[in-house]
Amino acid sequence: MIGVDIGTTSTKAVLFEENGRITAQANQGYPLHTPSPSVAEQDPEQILSAVFHTISTVMKDSAVHPDSVLFLSFSSAMHSVIAVDRTGNPLTPCITWADNRSAACAARLRDELGGHELYLRTGTPIHPMSPLTKLMWLGEEQPELFRQTDKFISIKEYIFAKLFGEYVIDYSIASSTGMFNLQQLDWDAEALHIAGITAERLSKPVPTTRIMQGLLPGMAEQLGLLPSTPFIVGATDGVLSNLGVGAIKPGVVAATIGTSGAIRTVVDRPLTDPKGRIFCYALTEKHWVIGGPVNNGGLLFRWVRDEFAASEVETAKRLGIDPYEVLTRIAEQVPPGSNGLLFHPYLTGERAPLWNPDARGSFFGLTMNHHKEHMIRSVLEGVIFNMYTVLLAMEEQIGRPAKIHATGGFARSSLWRQMMADIFDQEVVIPESFESSCLGAVVLGLYATGRTDSFDIVFSMIGSTHQHQPVKEHARVYKQLLPIYISLFRSLESQYQAIAEFQREQAGE
Ligand code: ADP
């Protein structure tokens, strides 16, 4: 079984045996073009060639006979838009989730065009990441190109069209466009009206379990597969990662902190938030994932390492240990709560729960008694506090979770893992998961092909590595600080815009 994850930095293909053992994997990166701060585009051809390269590489490296490949199943990044002409040629690059050029359209959608009502039906928070706002922007900025476009598709549809000559969009990617009605499982008429298009200019929505067969001539040879190998359309990387880390039961929440972060949980029906803070995306018609994406995760620790810790990084190099480990040991020297130093990690604005691109970072509570170790610790704490505020928004929908499954680079640090258990005041388990989106994709494939009737099969394919219980005394300290952390960002809200405008002016934007 091959799981393919088409991500923003690279495409990965992983060949699994039926028991979950990995026999081969391949990864190919590609650039994200950011010629100016709001632009974030990729070349669809480069991504397509990475998909071909990684699949053919795992076939070659594993020496598996094409006959014995049960299926391929696909995960992909959300929110991308490519305008293509009648022959399927791209008229634009792949405009990614990180592209912010539609910020003014998103604001107008929210303030003047009934964006909140639309969010309640479509599950995609009103934000420039959403393809709906990207179409509004394209229609306004490049009307001629907009008119010439035959279809607006995502990167996964682009790749499937090359393989099968057909435009299909899985319910999961569709549910992240801001234009898909979650109850009707079809395009939302009003959203299409706002985007200025009809349904013919989008792909046909199909279940995530849809099996495609009959590769176009020449494709099978290039991939090292048979023309009849089943391809499962699959879902988005976020919802599949939930499946891949085994966070599929009610009350189990997946918390990921890599460079960015996310909090998610599976529910059995579409569920949106009256306050518009959390997304709802499809995994299948019976499994929906709600949660929030967080911009400011591990990149904050990287920032500390690169900006504050030149001498510690030197020491680490001399000793041959990871600089993050040295920094974590320094942070460990001060007590939970960093003696009353709070840090807001909004260095790159924030999506959930604030949904404010102008939010900015700050240390609060500094005194002469605070030293570097307090600052390092409070940064780590600030990242977890921020994640917790997203969980609090989710709790209004699902109640208090029973367990947290945590993943991502942050989980390499026992201090940071324990901090999550203490701030969340919950048991935190670290599943042993490699490439969770690829694993999620193959579990969905097993389900789609009728080899299993339950996602529970994932439990036999993953183990767990660490477990942390909250330390009551620490949890108590964090509970005291949380209200200050929250009321602080509320009271700073009006100042965020002013300082962000000043910064933009200085940058000549
Ligand atoms: P990505 O999201 O880009 O795939 P990772 O999941 O590898 O990245 O996470 C990278 C982040 O993990 C780093 O920015 C850093 O914050 C954190 N990290 C990596 N190694 C360690 C470590 N040993 N201790 C603590 N944090 C770490």
Image: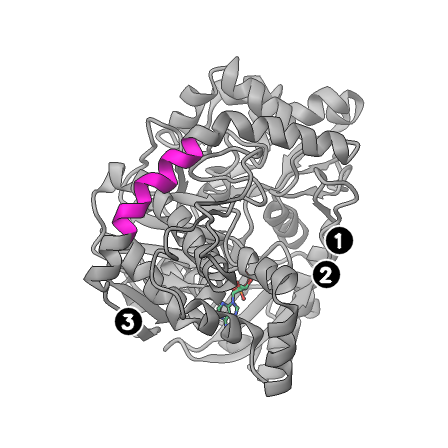
Is 195 placed above or below 337 here?
A: above
Indicate the secondary structure of the residue bearing disc 2.
helix
**For marks 3 and 2 on the same chain, the one whose residue lies earlier in the sequence:** 2
Which circle, 3 or 1, is nearer the viewer?
3
Residue depicted at 36% across the width and 43% down the height: 389
Q: Are marks 2 and 1 in contact (CB under 8 Å)?
A: yes
> Which x, y percent locates residue 48?
69, 56
**Which amino acid lies under the numbered mark 1 shown in the image of this protein?**
Glu
Q: Residues within 10 Å of mark 3 (few under 14, many from 20)?
A: some
Residue shown at the point (74%, 46%) measured from the top left = 34
Amino acid type assigned to the residue bearing label 3 in the image? Gln
Amino acid carrying mark 2 in the image:
Ser
Q: Nearer the viewer, residue 356 or 331?
A: 331
Residue 18 location, quadrant: bottom left
What is the CA distance from the residue labelled 3 to the residue labelled 2?
A: 40 Å
- Disc assigned to residue 45: 1
Can residue 282 be seen at all in this image of the molecule? yes
Q: Nearer the viewer, mark 3 or mark 2?
A: 3
**In the rendering, at what x and y percent does residue 72 appear?**
51, 64
Number of the label disc, if any, that sits on residue 49: 2
User: In front: 123, or 365?
Assistant: 365
